[in-house]
Amino acid sequence: MQTSKLRWNVRTIFNWNDKWGFYKGELDQDALLSGKNVIIPGETPGWESVDLPHTWNALDGQDGGNDYYQGAAWYKKTFTAEEGWKEVYVRFGAVSKLAQVWCNGRYVGEHRGGFSSFAFELTPFLQEGENEIFVRADNSNELPVYPRQADFTFFGGIYRSVELICFSGTSHFDVACFGCDGVFITPSPDGKVQVDAYVNGKGRSYARIYDADGKCAAESQISEAMHYILHVPDLKLWNGTKGAYLYQAKVFLCGESTDEIADEVCVSFGFRDFSVSAEEGFFLNGASYPLRGVCRHQDRENMGWAITEKEHLEDMALIREIGANTVRLAHYQQDPFFYDLCDRNGLVVWAEIPFISVHDERKEADDNLREQMKELVLQNYNHPSVCFWGIANEVGIGGESEAMYTILKELDQLAKKLDPTRLTAIANVGMTKTGSPLFHITDVTSYNEYNGWYEGTADDHGAFCDERHGQIPAIPLAISEYGAEGILSWHSEQPRVKDYSEEYQALVHEKAEKAFEARPYLWATWLWNMFDFAADARDEGGCRGRNNKGLVTYDRKIKKQAFYFYKACWSREPFVYLCGERFTKHADGKINIKAYSNLEHVELWVNGVFTGELSGKTIFEFKDVSLTRQFNEILVKTPEGFMDSLVFEKVEQVPEEYILKETKNISEAVTQWFAGIQAGNPGRADNKELVVNEGCLSVYDPMEEVYKYKEGFQIIQELVARPLSISNPAMASRMDKGGPMSFAGIWHHIKKMLPDELIYIVNERLNKIKKQD
């Protein structure tokens, strides 16, 4: 065998990542599987050699235009079966979104879902000598497989590792048990450990539990039973970032009449207890433990989802650097290695399935949600870091329905049935009314709120939370997303909403964090996002194909200003950071100079002269500091000896390169359509104010309210959906249903494709429709 392998007694695991053939596009399936290397004329000339992990969207999924390839592609690999292999399985870490597998021309099976592990037995399909496996991967948008619609790129490919698992016997733990090894460990804070094992074939089993020093802490008797209890005395708790103590359970399978080991599975786990109070927040092991952290997407620039352990380790190091104690793994199941890292580093995890933005009411789509929920829970059951199973994200944004409530209730009950030890959660879009059933399904709830970016102002975070908490005081409430875009090129002395500057992003986070810290009833807050990520449909802030709300750039090379703000808030590692490392040219003779630190005192020195000292916490802002030279040496330091410095240049006017100049992306067809609308003058807006007539509809009303009126629906379809269908059919289809978001909120996402005057015309038309009591 030409690939690396790891032997566990009679189980041999081959790393199967190298030397795959890849073809982008569809092939003549029957001819291909009969042994012919068929290439469809006019397509890519042939197969190429690739190593896994691999995605075909690494470049076109991040460059904007919403035109990345979503369709089928093929992978193939040849191998030789070794003597002594009694049973053989292939296990895929993830294939997006649909995977179909053949071995030696015979169909093995399929898997629907792009984020979970799955395994197939190959034994019945093997032949002597050379064998060949084919995998058809498909990330087509129309598949009844979630995610169906979301603000991120759905990368296609075999983008996680593949293993070939071989056994010399026929009795072993069930490696095809929903993509895991068939061993589930349920620890209790009193030291009780329940072991549940699922086996192919027959045998007897026993378990040993080892502490972090490798000493045996408990051992069971050998038994035919596959479900039994052990007790660990004098246990140590998994206590988050204060001390993530892990035990290891080794579960052994023996023959029916012999003590010889037939298979072995090793599982890391931890003892911990947690709870959530609607008034006092999150508790870990009986102590208050406010959760403050980040959301994380898994993709990387020029790599997409096809990342390795190296990239996971880098991401974890950055998350730990800012001192976060929790991570929301959005919006899908992530690599098992990253859950391991969360266990080791003490990060509390919200894990979720990709039920996001819309509900596809096809039966196959609901079935897929159930399957992904099962896989998420069972594959991550043993991780002490996981405390919450997320069943959905912003599904009410396009409108709610009884069918939606039904499947959400099913998912909630399914998660509880599979795992009664953890809590279920849901993330709701900020405009969702607290009276919605969406707030009364899961154990805990949360809001994605973007005050200061999509709605409201940066000063509204506290009032937003207080109002919602007051309306549902008995339901534990968290903030599952908040933030703003921050693009490295743009800077401002007076940052404002939608200027995309680093300074405005930091300002939003400064105000949000202050508001959240003053409200202990919030059981958690997760900022959006730790890292910039690909969203190929996006084109804003002068950057195509990307969501720039991360604290760190897409390539992980640059930490934005807001990164250091959170490091000052959460990290215990002493430091001081001088803001403005990419904003060094200033036109004003006097400026404010800001520093972040987790120490109590910061001094400012300008051109070698002591200028002042501030005492405080986190943010240290020196007002009206004079720049007396063309090039001014700015130094901040603390009494403990930590320092940071920059050179600020005094210039005549604000540099053009600091100011975003938004451009329109209006097609000629839309321009001609709008000229016709203006010629007909059906409510043309001469005044550029969004006036709201009392008792009438306006662009500030939720779309679900507007759509209650036939005339309101017709206005949106005629003036918005129709021109959007010319340039962006996917966005136009979102106008088919109402939802809690207002048209004014939606306008932010579509205004580059439409004339500026259109929102005023829509508002004038809506203002003519009187609301009914």
Image: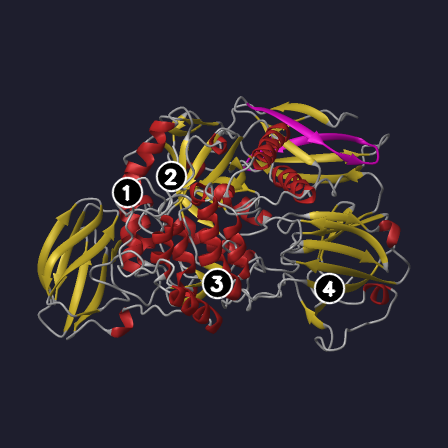
Quarter of the rendering occupied by the N terminus: bottom right
Q: Is residue 53 left or right of residue 62?
A: right
Q: Earlier in the sequence, mark 3 or mark 4?
A: 4
The three-letter code of the residue at mark 4 reads Tyr
Mark 4–mark 2 CB contact (< 8 Å):
no
Q: Which structural element holds mark 3?
A: helix
618 is higher (above) or lower (below) than 649? above
Disc 1/disc 2 C-alpha distance (Å): 28 Å
Q: Earlier in the sequence, mark 3 or mark 2?
A: 3
Q: Which one is in front in this view, the residue at disc 4 or the one at disc 1?
A: 1
Which residue is denoted by mark 3 in the rendering? 723
The three-letter code of the residue at mark 3 reads Pro
Q: Position of residue 567 (x, y in %)?
A: 32, 49
Q: Position of residue 771 (x, y in %)?
A: 38, 39
Which residue is denoted by mark 2 in the rendering? 771
Count residues near mark 2 (Cα–Cα under 10 Å), then give few for <14, some for 14-19, many for 20+: some
487 is higher (above) or lower (below) than 219? below
> Which range is magenta?
191-216
Q: Which one is in front in this view, the residue at disc 4 or the one at disc 2?
A: 2
Does the magenta portion include 354? no
The three-letter code of the residue at mark 1 reads Asp
Count residues near mark 3 (Cα–Cα under 10 Å), then give few for <14, some for 14-19, many for 20+: many
In the drawing, what numbered circle is on residue 460? 1
Disc 4/disc 1 C-alpha distance (Å): 51 Å
Which residue is denoted by mark 4 in the rendering? 75
